[in-house]
Amino acid sequence: MSEDNNRDSLIAAARMALENSYSPYSKFRVGAALHFADGTVVTGTNIENASYGLALCAETVAVAKAMDDGHRGGLEEVAVIGETAAPITPCGRCRQVLNELAGLGGTDPVVWCAGEDDVVKTHLSDLLPQAFGPASLKG
Ligand code: THU
């Protein structure tokens, strides 16, 4: 599969995921999709709460679903999409959450940041340089 096909299908999966968004407060639907080395794709969408600060981002939901399915590393690509013209990037908390899973497999996943009109390719290490991770706890 060419990189572009991979990109387009992962973004399509993220876009489908946002159909299940529960975002009555922000009305900002977000979808995320994770592609693993074994070919698995795990998606997530944002889930808000009447206690606004408890909102779960799409990427964090996807990571939780993947880890609950047993994934520990092998994270090769991430796609995130919002319903804005310009691409959205993962929030700071989601970068940290993605970093934990990626670090378990020693990968630096491509992150496709998508909007309705544009896609930007980046890597997790560019979004979260000098990350705090498990090794940081050991000094
Ligand atoms: N949101 C995500 O799902 N992912 C991000 O990386 C940024 C923000 C969600 C959280 C909230 O439900 C809505 O977008 C508005 O901030």
Image (cartoon, rainbow, N blue to C red):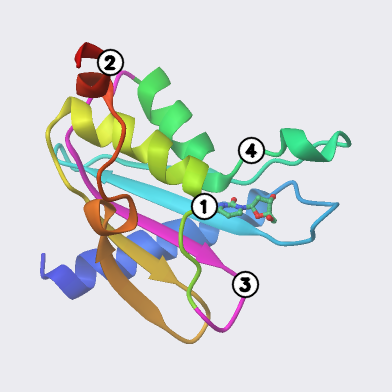
Residue type at tag 2:
Leu
- Of circles 4 and 3, the one toward us is 4
Q: Which mark is residue 83?
A: 3
Residue 88: x and y in percent read 50, 68
The range drawn in magenta is 70-86
Circle 4/circle 3 CB separation < 8 Å: no
Q: Quadrant of residue 112?
A: bottom left
Q: Residues within 10 Å of mark 1 (few under 14, many from 20)?
A: few
Q: Which residue is mark 4?
A: 56
Q: Earlier in the sequence, mark 4 or mark 1?
A: 4
Circle 4/circle 1 CB separation < 8 Å: no
Residue 47: x and y in percent read 69, 41
Q: Which mark is residue 49?
A: none
Residue 58: x and y in percent read 55, 46
Q: Earlier in the sequence, mark 1 or mark 3?
A: 3
Q: Which residue is mark 2?
A: 137
Establish whether ligand 1 lies closer than 8 Å to the Cβ of label 1: yes
Compute the Cα span from label 1 to label 3. Answer: 16 Å
